[in-house]
Image: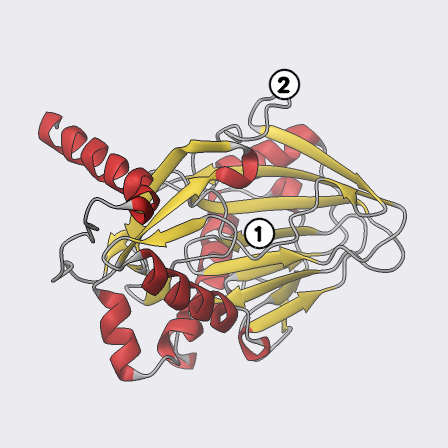
Amino acid sequence: MSESAKAPLPEGWSVQRLSGSLGAEVRGLRLAEAGPEQAAAIRALLAEHLVLFFPDQAPTPDEHIAFGRLFGELESHPNLKLGGERPEFFELRAMGGAGAVADEWHSDLSCQHEPSLLAILHMKKCPEVGGDTLWSNMYKAYAELSAPMRALCDGLTALHDASPHFKPEQRAIHPVVRVHPETGRRSLFVNHHFTRRIVELSDAESDMLLGYLSRWAASHRFTVRYRWQAGTVAMWDNRCTQHYVLDDFEGERVIQRVTVMGDQPERAQDSPWPAYRAAAKAASWRDFAMQEQLRKQKREQANT
């Protein structure tokens, strides 16, 4: 967003950028009192900074849910069956690095047909030292690829699944490069945690490219690192960021979260290549999950 295109901040708000790539702290508002007008201003800031932090908030669960609903429909987490009277609201605890620690780079729920739009996290309790979270800007990760690499990635798709959550059958195929429905910008959309395979490449070629793109997406110059304080609320656009929790802390870390689901990733362009199909031989088993998902999606498309 250009300087001239920026909307004026509501009275009393202040915004402090946190890195050259993404991230800003926003002060001067109470999220528990936010309504549609404030939500529109927050959306504009999110489009500019991709991840926002609101210190000194400490919302109750009901306030947290009400704030989340300003941005869309909330859903329960498909891989975290935590129960409770509020299925769209969940709390995760970790003690000394053991427990719920998302210590791999990922885009939330990219294994779903319609992945998460955005997440809103309240740091209920955090250790004095450690447990920072990093986010990476996938617009920049895409834009700073060489022109031939961008052209290759624009035409590729990838299989994502929930194998890390012991649910390999929960899978989807998404573009390697997606177009943001609000900004129109292209971003890299593969991640170390959920992305298993490039559909148009052989298994060996896919491993090579995914390994490179995963390392590239985590390049320091694309990132912001945030040191938490209890009572801080963060929200991020899952369509153009990845994040990673540093598992380096002692003591207890408690987060509360709601998730706004979801839209189907839009492709940068149609693929000029068919899905890879190996000849029937010992190594062809590596293609089974991909081929099964392609057949499933073809059946679904035929029924719509």
Mark closer to the observer (2, 1): 2
Tell which residue pokes out farthest to the bottom in this image. Answer: 146
Helix, strand or loop status at disc 1: strand
Within-10-Å neighbours for mark 2: few <14, some 14–19, many 20+: few
- Tell me the residue at 48%/60% (across/down): 241
**Label 1 near label 2: C-beta < 8 Å?**
no
User: 122 or 143: which is nearer to us?
Assistant: 143
Q: Which residue is mark 2?
A: 83
Question: Three-letter amino acid code at disc 2?
Answer: Gly
- Tell me the residue at 46%/55% (across/down): 43
Question: Is residue 281 depicted above or below 191 in this figure?
Answer: above
Q: Which residue is mark 1?
A: 235
Question: Is residue 205 depicted above or below 60 in this figure?
Answer: below
Where in the figure is residue 44, as x and y percent of width and height? Answer: 44, 61
Question: Three-letter amino acid code at disc 1?
Answer: Met
- Tell me the residue at 56%/57% (across/down): 105
User: 151 or 64: which is nearer to us?
Assistant: 151
